[in-house]
Each structure stands twice: as C-alpha cells, then as structure tokens.
Amino acid sequence: MGKVKRSPWLLHYDASSCNGCDIEVLASLTPVYDAERFGVVNTGDPMQADILLVTGGVNAQSAEVVKQIYDQMARPKVVVAVGVCACTGGVFKDCYNISGGVDTVIPVDVYVPGCAARPESIIDGIVKAVAIFQERSDKHEKYIKEHGESARDMSDPDAAAREGNPADFFDALGKTSDNKEGK
Ligand code: SF4
C-alpha cells in the first residue's frame, strides 16, 4: 500500500448475515487485530463514510437499504463484500428470499472470501480498499482541478459505467415478485 493522504472512514452494514462475519468484522476493529492502525476510522454515518463493508447476502428487504447507504456515500467510495454470503449469496444463494451477493445491487471492489471471513482476511480486504480509495481520491482531485469545483458531484468519470442504473435492479425485482410475465 502506498502513501495514504487521509484516514478513510469505514461503515459496516449487515445485509442478512448469520452474525458470524459481523463478529469477525468487530474483532478486526478491536485492539487485538486493530484495523485502525491502517488509518481507518469506524463510523455509523453513510455521509461520512468512504469504505462500505457489507456482510451477508442481499434479500428483498436489505437490497434497498444497501443501495440507499451506497447512494448516500460521497464519491470516491469503495465497497468490500465480507464473507462468501456477501460475495455470492453463499449457502443461501438458492433460497427464495436471497437475491445473491452484494454486487447484485451495487458495484463491489473487493471480495473477502471465507465462512466466516477471518479477521486477517478482512484486514487484507480493508488494506486493499484503502489503496483503491487513495487511487480514486487522486483521480477525483485531478478531475476537479481540470474541470473546476462545479464538477465535484460528477467528478468520477467512471462512476456511471461502474454503477449502472440501479433502477434496473428494482425493476427486475418488481417484475419477479409482482408480475411474473415481466410486463
Ligand atoms: S459467510 Fe458464513 S459466517 Fe458469514 S454470514 Fe455467511 S454463513 Fe454467516
């Protein structure tokens, strides 16, 4: 990991975890594993967060929350899927109420495997996320310098392509649950 210019703030959300991965995320943030030595700070406020850690697969209830948290975070932002459920849906992926991994709703940058994901793996994922965050921050600032302060809201030129149109996901959910013919 190269030089980090500021401490990214980190937010954890449980999308439908069995709590196994949540306990390991907490362990990663406590003094034994101490993710804060890499400069990250835990926050409960999406508007202050730079890195989103999600545990558990996405279901119909949590999908909208995941999307809302992501939308509330300012750019640049990084998403880490923690545990196999968050990566792919895991053992629950064929359940009627699970849509799949976090990347069925929002773009995911780092995948941390494991059931439960071990604190060492989570810290590895956080370090990768910090490096991605720094890289995006540098591009972000360069873009602002080139295009002016008024461009700040749209300053990640790849964002639209990476994020896609989230409405498509909810349209698809609506067609599946409300209208089997997809009309
Ligand atoms: S990956 Fe394993 S420990 Fe983590 S939420 Fe899924 S079932 Fe629980």
Image (cartoon, helix red, strand yellow):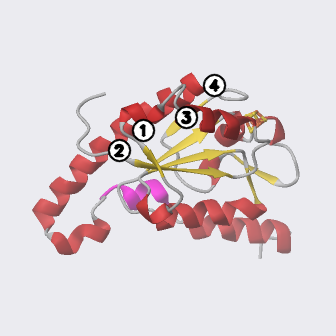
Q: Is disc 4's CB within 8 Å of ligand 1?
A: no
Looking at the picture, which amino acid does disc 3 mark? Answer: Thr
> At 44% across and 65% down in the image, what residue appears?
47
Please state the total of marks drawn on the protein image: 4
In this rendering, which labeled residue sits more in front, label 4 or label 1?
Answer: 4
Report the residue marked by disc 3. Answer: 30
**First of labels 4, 1 by sequence position:** 4
Report the residue marked by disc 1. Answer: 129
In the rendered view, tell whether residue 10 sits above or below residue 65: above
Q: Mark 2: give few (<14), some (14-19) or many (20+) Cα within 10 Å.
A: many
Q: Which mark is residue 118?
A: 4
Looking at the picture, which amino acid does disc 1 mark? Answer: Ala
Q: Position of residue 45 (x, y in %)?
A: 50, 62
Q: Secondary structure at mark 3?
A: loop
Front one among 134 and 180:
134
**First of labels 2, 3 by sequence position:** 3
Q: Is residue 73 magenta?
A: no
Q: Secondary structure at mark 1?
A: helix
Predominant SS of the magenta segment: helix
Front one among 181 and 121:
121
**First of labels 2, 4 by sequence position:** 4
Q: Secondary structure at mark 2?
A: helix
Q: Secondary structure at mark 4?
A: loop
**First of labels 3, 1 by sequence position:** 3
Part of the protein shown in magenta? 157-164
Q: Position of residue 51 (x, y in %)?
A: 45, 48
User: Gap in Å between the C-alphas at discs 2 and 4?
Assistant: 22 Å
Q: Position of residue 26 (x, y in %)?
A: 61, 38
CB under 8 Å between callouts 1 and 2? Answer: yes
